[in-house]
Image (cartoon, helix red, strand yellow):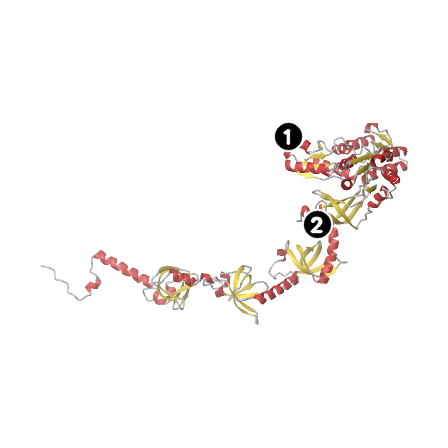
C-alpha cells in the first residue's frame, strides 16, 4: 500500500489562533469560559477543559466574573453588547476571515444594501454573520435564490451584497454567483471563501482522484471537515471520516493500493500524527508526519520581502492571495498597479501566480497586506538603471508639468524631463503633453536621491534619423507620401514627410491663384504630397500637392470655346488690363481696350478686385494656355440690340438701305 499525504492539513491559522488564545489565557491564570466550543473538535474542547477552561452554550449561562472566550466562528453583535452590559471581559478569537464578513454585511446594510449570505443557516459562523445585520437573506443553492426572486418582481432590482461561508465549496459558491448574476441587476459580490480552505479543498479533490481510498481526519460536527468528505466522495469510491486513530478502518483499507490522507482545519496535529503513525506501523511505510508537513508548509513572512502566491479571489476592493502561510494575503486594488486606468480583470485573474511585496504583517488578525505596485516599482528602478546603461528606449505617461519641465511615470518611477528635452517647439505649452504616452531615453539615475532624468527629444531625434535614412534610400519622382506642414514662407510650405522636409512651392499648393501659402494650407495640416524633383547630393526635395489628374485647362477646353459667355471673378488689376478667374487654375485677360465701350485711363476706373462680371471669350491660345476675354463685346452687342429694337418701334428704314445711294421715290400728288 502506498500513502499519499495532503500538503495542507490540520489547524488553519484562525483555528490555531483561537486555541492558542484559550490556552495562553488559562496558563496566565485567567478564569476563562468558552462561549460554545472554541472550535469544532471534541478532543480540543476536552483538552481545554482539562486546563481549567469552562464551557457555556449561551450568553445567559455565563457566570459572573469570568473571562469569556469567543469562539473562532464569531458571535452576533448583540452578544458583544450583552457581555459589555454585564461587565464581562472577553477574549475575541473570531477568525479574521469571519470578522471581515461581519464588517462587509454591516457596511452593506448601512449603505442601504441587503446582505445575501451563501451558507448553512444553522452553522454557528452563519448565525454570527447574520447577527451583524437586521435583514439578511441566507441561501444554500440557486433554487433558494430563485424562490426568493419569485416572491416579488422588485426583488430582482434589490441592491445586494453577496458573501459566503468561509468553508463553502467553490462549486456551491460559483453556482449561486452565476445564477444571481443572470437574474439581478444591482450586485456587489465578495468571494469570502477562506484561502486556506480553498487550498485544502483543491488538494483534497486532486488527491482523491489519484487514490483508491481516502481517510478524512476531523470532528463530524466540523463543517469544513464534512466538506472535505463530500468533495472526496465525488471523486473516490471509498471515503472514511474518522475523529482519531481509534476509528481507523484498517481492514477496509487492506485492499487499497493507494490511500490518501487529509484532515479538517479543526483537527489538532497530535491526532493527525497518531493516525499517520498507526497507519505507518501497520503497513510499514516511512512517511513524514502531518505535523511535520504542516509546519514545513507554513512560511514565515516579514515586512519588506518578496513573496509569491496564487490568486484565489477578486473583489471590487481587494485581491485574495494564497501565500502558503498561516496568514491570509490581500492586495488592495489601490496597490495593484500604478496605472489608474487599468482594469483589475485585465491585469490579474483567479489562479494566476503573482509576485508581491509584503507591506504589513498583522499576526493578531492573521492578515498580510501586500502590494504588487511597490514590488513593480522596485523592479522598475532596476529596469530604469539597466535602461540607462543599455541606452534602451522606455515608455511612460506624462503626469504633470513641473518647474522647468514635465514628470513622466515610467513603471511607477518618476522621471523628470527638462523643457529643452521635451521635443516641443518653444511656442507650444508643456501642458499639451500631460496625459499622453511618450517614448524617452534615461540620461541620469541617482537612486539614493530618488532622482531620474530623461529625454524625449533624444528618442525623437533617433527616430527621425532612422526614418530619414529610409526615405532617402527609396525616394523617387512621383512617389506619394503623407506629410505634415512644418512651416510656411512667402514662396511656399515646408512639409515633413517622415524625418525629411520637402518644399512645396506656392504654385504647387493649389490650382487657384493665391498670394500667400496660408490661403491654401496651415502649420500642422496633414497633406498627401508627391515628389516632383529630388537632389540627393544637396538633400533637396520638391513636392507637389495639387492633383494633376484634375488639370483645370483640360476642364476649361471641354467646357468653353471662343464665343462662350460666362461670369468671371476679377482677381488682379494691372495697368494694361485685368486678370479674371474663369475656374480655379485658369485665368483670362481682359485687355484695357476690352473693358468698356469707351476710352478709359486705367482698369480700376471700371473694375475692382473680387468683382464678378460677365465676359465673352474672344480668343484662346491652346499652346500657351492663354485666354482673351471681353466685356466690351457684350456691351456693343447689347447696344446694337437696343438700337435695332428702337428702330423697329419708330418704323425707321434699315440703316443699310438708307445708305445704299438710291433716291427715295417722290410722293404722289
Q: Are marks 2 and 1 in contact (CB under 8 Å)?
A: no
Q: Which type of secondary structure does the marked residue at label 1 adopt?
A: helix
Q: Where, quadrant-wise, is the N terminus in this rendering? A: top right
**Foreground of the two, 363 or 167:** 167
Q: Which residue is mark 2?
A: 337
Residue lying farthest to the left in this orientation? 669
Q: Is residue 645 above or below residue 104?
A: below
Tag 1 residue: 150
Q: Is residue 647 above or below residue 225?
A: below
Identify which residue is drawn at 62% across, 64% down.
466
**Disc 2 residue crowd, few under 14, some 14–19, many 20+, Cα 10 Å:** many
- The relative height of residue 282 versus residue 420 in the rendered view (above or below) is above
> Looking at the image, which residue sits at the far top?
60
Which quadrant of the figure has residue 176? top right
Cα distance in 3D space between marks 2 and 1:
42 Å
Name which quarter of the figure residue 57 lies in.
top right
The 10 Å Cα crowd at callout 1, few under 14, some 14 to 19, many 20 or more, is few
Residue toward you, 586 or 294 = 294
Amino acid at each position: 500500500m502506498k500513502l499519499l499525504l495532503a500538503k495542507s492539513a490540520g489547524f488553519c491559522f484562525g483555528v490555531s489562533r483561537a486555541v492558542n488564545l484559550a490556552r495562553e489565557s488559562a496558563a496566565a491564570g485567567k478564569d476563562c469560559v468558552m462561549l460554545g466550543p472554541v472550535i469544532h473538535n471534541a478532543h480540543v474542547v476536552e483538552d481545554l477543559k482539562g486546563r481549567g477552561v469552562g464551557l457555556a452554550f449561551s450568553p445567559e449561562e455565563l457566570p459572573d466574573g469570568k473571562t469569556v472566550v469567543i469562539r473562532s466562528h464569531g458571535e452576533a453583535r448583540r452578544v458583544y453588547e450583552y457581555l459589555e452590559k454585564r461587565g464581562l471581559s472577553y477574549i475575541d478569537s473570531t477568525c479574521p476571515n469571519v470578522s471581515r464578513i461581519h464588517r462587509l454585511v454591516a457596511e452593506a446594510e448601512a449603505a442601504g444594501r441587503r446582505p445575501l449570505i451563501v451558507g448553512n443557516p444553522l452553522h454557528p459562523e452563519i448565525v454570527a454573520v447574520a447577527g451583524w445585520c437586521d435583514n439578511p437573506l441566507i441561501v444554500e443553492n440557486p433554487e433558494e435564490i430563485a424562490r426568493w426572486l419569485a416572491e416579488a418582481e422588485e426583488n430582482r432590482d434589490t441592491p445586494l451584497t453577496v458573501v459566503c461561508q468561509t468553508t463553502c465549496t467553490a462549486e456551491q459558491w460559483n453556482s449561486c454567483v452565476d445564477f444571481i448574476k443572470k437574474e439581478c441587476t444591482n450586485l456587489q459580490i465578495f468571494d469570502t471563501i477562506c484561502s486556506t480552505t480553498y487550498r485544502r479543498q483543491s488538494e483534497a479533490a486532486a488527491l482523491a482522484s489519484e487514490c483508491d481510498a481516502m481517510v478524512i481526519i476531523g470532528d463530524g460536527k466540523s463543517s469544513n471537515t464534512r466538506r472535505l468528505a463530500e468533495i472526496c466522495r465525488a471523486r473516490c469510491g471509498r471515503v472514511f471520516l474518522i475523529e482519531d486513530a481509534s476509528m481507523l478502518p484498517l481492514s477496509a483499507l487492506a485492499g487499497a493500493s493507494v490511500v490518501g490522507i487529509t484532515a479538517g482545519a479543526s483537527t489538532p496535529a497530535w491526532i493527525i500524527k497518531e493516525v499517520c503513525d498507526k497507519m505507518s506501523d501497520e503497513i510499514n511505510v516511512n512517511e513524514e508526519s502531518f505535523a511535520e508537513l504542516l509546519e514545513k508548509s507554513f512560511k514565515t513572512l516579514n515586512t519588506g520581502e518578496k513573496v509569491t502566491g496564487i490568486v484565489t479571489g477578486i473583489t471590487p476592493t481587494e485581491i485574495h492571495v494564497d501565500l502558503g502561510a498561516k496568514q491570509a494575503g490581500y492586495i488592495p486594488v489601490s496597490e495593484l498597479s500604478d496605472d489608474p486606468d487599468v482594469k483589475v480583470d485585465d491585469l490579474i485573474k483567479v489562479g494566476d501566480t503573482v509576485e508581491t511585496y509584503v507591506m504589513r504583517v498583522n499576526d493578531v488578525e492573521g492578515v498580510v497586506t501586500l502590494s504588487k505596485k511597490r514590488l513593480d516599482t522596485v523592479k522598475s528602478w532596476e529596469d530604469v538603471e539597466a535602461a540607462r546603461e543599455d541606452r534602451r528606449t522606455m515608455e511612460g505617461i506624462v503626469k504633470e508639468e513641473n518647474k522647468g519641465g514635465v514628470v513622466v511615470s515610467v513603471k511607477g518611477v518618476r522621471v523628470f524631463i527638462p523643457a529643452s528635452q521635451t521635443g516641443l517647439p518653444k511656442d507650444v505649452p508643456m501642458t499639451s503633453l500631460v496625459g499622453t504616452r511618450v517614448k524617452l531615453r534615461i540620461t541620469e539615475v541617482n537612486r539614493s536621491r530618488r532622482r531620474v532624468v530623461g529625454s524625449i527629444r533624444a528618442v525623437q531625434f533617433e527616430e527621425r534619423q532612422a526614418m530619414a535614412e529610409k526615405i532617402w534610400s527609396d525616394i523617387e519622382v512621383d512617389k506619394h507620401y503623407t506629410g505634415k506642414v512644418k512651416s510656411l514662407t512667402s514662396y511656399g510650405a515646408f512639409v515633413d514627410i517622415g524625418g525629411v522636409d520637402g518644399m512645396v512651392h506656392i504654385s504647387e499648393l493649389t490650382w487657384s491663384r493665391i498670394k500667400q501659402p496660408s490661403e491654401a494650407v496651415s502649420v500642422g495640416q496633414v497633406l498627401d504630397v508627391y515628389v516632383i524633383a529630388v537632389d540627393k547630393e544637396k538633400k533637396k526635395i520638391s513636392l507637389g500637392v495639387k492633383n494633376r489628374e484634375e488639370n483645370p485647362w483640360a476642364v476649361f477646353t471641354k467646357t468653353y470655346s471662343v464665343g462662350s459667355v460666362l461670369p468671371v471673378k476679377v482677381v488682379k488689376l494691372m495697368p494694361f488690363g485685368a486678370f479674371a478667374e474663369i475656374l480655379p487654375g485658369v485665368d483670362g485677360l481682359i485687355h484695357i481696350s476690352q473693358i468698356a465701350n469707351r476710352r478709359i485711363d486705367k482698369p480700376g476706373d471700371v473694375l475692382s478686385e473680387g468683382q464678378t462680371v460677365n465676359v465673352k471669350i474672344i480668343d484662346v491660345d491652346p499652346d500657351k494656355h492663354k485666354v482673351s476675354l471681353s466685356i466690351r463685346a457684350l456691351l456693343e452687342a447689347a447696344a446694337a440690340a437696343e438700337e435695332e429694337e428702337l428702330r423697329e418701334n419708330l418704323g425707321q428704314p434699315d440703316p443699310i438701305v438708307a445708305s445704299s445711294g438710291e433716291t427715295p421715290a417722290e410722293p404722289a400728288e
